[in-house]
Image: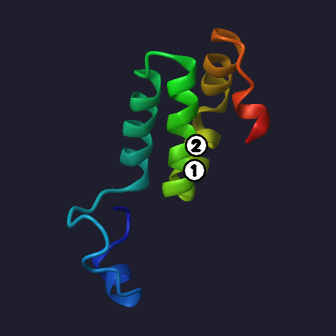
Amino acid sequence: MAFSAKERDAFNLWGLLPAAETNLLLQRKRSYETFKNKPSDVEKYIYLRDLQDSNEILFYSLLVENIENIHADCLYAGGWIGLSTI
């Protein structure tokens, strides 16, 4: 969704992406809220893996900006391996 109209034209992306445009900052904020609202560590892990598979730029942006919080949630909350495998 972060592709501008000019980029969508250049890469012939019309019809392949949602019509709405937004920026990476807003996407990252929404993704982090979604991550925090997952009820279990397993669901948080699955969300991050799905995000990495579907939008790698957003995934790494989310990690870079929130690594300490995500690491604390993943590592200490339930003890799952999570980020050590990413």
Q: Quadrant of the N terminus?
A: bottom left
Say which quarter of the image contains residue 70: top right
Question: Looking at the picture, which amino acid does disc 2 mark?
Answer: Arg
Question: In the visual, does 85 lie left or right of 26?
Answer: right
Q: CA distance from mark 2 to mark 1?
A: 5 Å
Label 1 packing within 10 angstroms: few (<14), some (14-19), many (20+): some
- Please tell me whether mark 1 sits on a helix, a strand or a loop: helix
- Please tell me whether mark 2 sits on a helix, a strand or a loop: helix
The residue at 50%/16% (across/down) is 40
Question: Looking at the picture, which amino acid does disc 1 mark?
Answer: Gln
Tell me, for residue 4, which label it has, or none: none
Q: Which residue is mark 1?
A: 52
Question: In the visual, does 5 lie left or right of 80?
Answer: left
Q: Nearer the viewer, residue 65 or 47?
A: 47
The residue at 57%/50% (across/down) is 52
The residue at 37%/63% (across/down) is 2
Q: Nearer the viewer, residue 35 or 24?
A: 35
Up the image or down, 52 lies above or below 14; here it is above
Q: Position of residue 20 (x, y in %)?
A: 21, 62
Check whether the beta carbons of the residues at disc 2 and disc 1 lie within 8 A of each other: yes
Up the image or down, 24 lies above or below 17; here it is above
Q: Position of residue 37 (x, y in %)?
A: 40, 21
The residue at 34%/80% (across/down) is 13
Say which quarter of the image contains residue 23: bottom left
Q: Quadrant of the C terminus?
A: top right
Label 2 packing within 10 angstroms: few (<14), some (14-19), many (20+): some
Q: Which residue is mark 2?
A: 49
Residue furthest left in the image: 19
Q: Position of residue 34 (x, y in %)?
A: 39, 31
Up the image or down, 78 lies above or below 28; here it is above
Q: Position of residue 80 (x, y in %)?
A: 70, 20
